[in-house]
Amino acid sequence: MSKKTVLYDKHVEYGGKIVDFAGWQMPVNYGSQIEEHHQVRTDAGMFDVSHMTVIDLTGEDVKPFLQKLLANDVARLKAQGKALYSCMLNQDGGVIDDLIVYYLEDIWYRMVVNAATRDKDLAWIDQQSSGFDVEIKERSDLAMIAVQGPHAREKAIEVLPVDVVEAVSELDRFYGSQCGEWFVGRTGYTGEDGFEIMLPDSEAPSFWDGLAEAGVKPCGLGARDTLRLEAGMNLYGADMTESTTPLISGLGWTVAWEPEDRDFIGRAALERQREKGVAQKLVGLVLEEKGILRGHQRVVVDGVGEGETTSGTFSPTLKQSIAFARVPKQTGSHCQVEIRGKLLSARVVKPVFVRDGKAV
Amino acid sequence: MSEIPSELKYTKSHEWVRNEDDGTVTVGITDHAQELLGDLVYVELPEVGTEMAAEDAVCVVESVKAASDVYMPVSGEVVVVNSDLADAPETINDSPYDDGWLIKIKLSNPDEINDLMDADSYEAEIEED
């Protein structure tokens, strides 16, 4: 049975084309994915991300628990509201999920994890929490709307409740603020400025209408994917999985090795991999010929070896095809990708293609 | 609702076929197909002179979302391709039945046209999807 977010009727009303995504009935676009993409790069768009899983962790042991659970270190979160991106690993160093965690109070952190991984994440977190004084509560009573784009914040501020506006108008990037039942983070998954706004289900439909009236256009999951790929942001299940570690997924920067005595889950496996030498890396590819890169295409690096694309698409900003690929460590500046039996030439780049509306 | 011109013939795999009454047909993908695919960003056309049987994959159209094969609705030789699409694949979204045509085929067996669906049957077919 497919689930619907509280905004489902709005998606239908606004002309959304509904598809199944991780068991949810979600809009893939509202007409043109490419127009929605440009809308976010140049102005402001909104995404219903209520299907994502919000988890509140509270209790005396919440900090030491998260220091064990996550590969990044929540001790880095010194200021109230600060957000941290992290992987949650299994004992082999494989990625169970990637997530954002906000530090709200010494005994209260909020995590946002993927929709597709909800069940296994909750089971894993619950299993690991034994022996810790920590309460784990899923916040399925909250809707979440991501408002993204260079004009996203000013347009959202026109519509947010007055007390929330006071709390968020001076919010720095990668911070969040709780205000009554609302929570606003200056975060996102598009490479643009903006807010991710959690609010009570009952208030979400009218807030959606208000944003639309302020000129924030509804955007579907299709544009969300091309935006995140251009921005060089990994997608769980494609660019990293339980059988890949952060070190071969372009996420080494999210692993906090210091302090050395912090024994997070997966640490020993990552240290072994690091000592042995990490054989692969995640890179960006720009296709130099016509065609479209997709996930799971064979990558050939002359004289070095082979790899595979993990996700790929047509970049509406660059008007070329781009991808992430896992390739041998020694890969230089060029490779070839096999598309329908033909080897096409591609440039190897850092996996960030667009930031704040501009080609990198 | 998708547009389904009554003068054209159709296949289950969402190609349309216009009989030019000179032994050739023009082929494209239907309005319904372009709606399903979303914004088209790449078209791979065959070489002129390619000979293929009905139901062989002859072109690839790719949207931002996915790649999709286009099949020969009838057997024959590809005699013209719409090379304008290389730089403007979105023409298929904007005008699937006119400027967005893909190829012209010289029929090797003219009777095969009679095996294709008419507009009413195609409409019934996509309503079942």
Image (spheres, coloured by chain):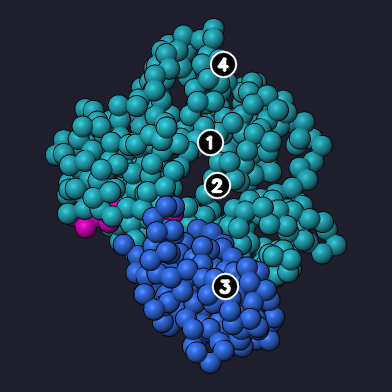
Q: Amino acid at mark 3?
A: Pro
Quadrant for the N terminus of chain A, please.
Answer: top left
Cβ atoms under marks 2 and 1 closer than 8 Å: yes
Q: Is residue B101 above or below residue A319?
A: below
Instruction: Identify the residue position indicated by label 1 in the image.
Output: A98
Examine the structure image and report whether residue A254 is included in the region drawn in magenta: no
Instruction: Identify the residue position indicated by label 4 in the image.
Output: A128
Image mark 3: chain: B
- Could you give the CA–CA distance between mark 2 and mark 3, rounded to whole angstroms? 40 Å
The magenta stretch spans which residues? A214-223
Mark with earlier residue (1, 4) = 1
Q: Which chain is cyan?
A: A
Query: Dot 3: what SS?
Result: loop
Q: Is residue A139 above or below residue B59?
A: above
Q: Which chain is blue?
A: B
Instruction: Identify the residue position indicated by label 2 in the image.
Output: A234
Instruction: Identify the residue position indicated by label 3 in the image.
Output: B73
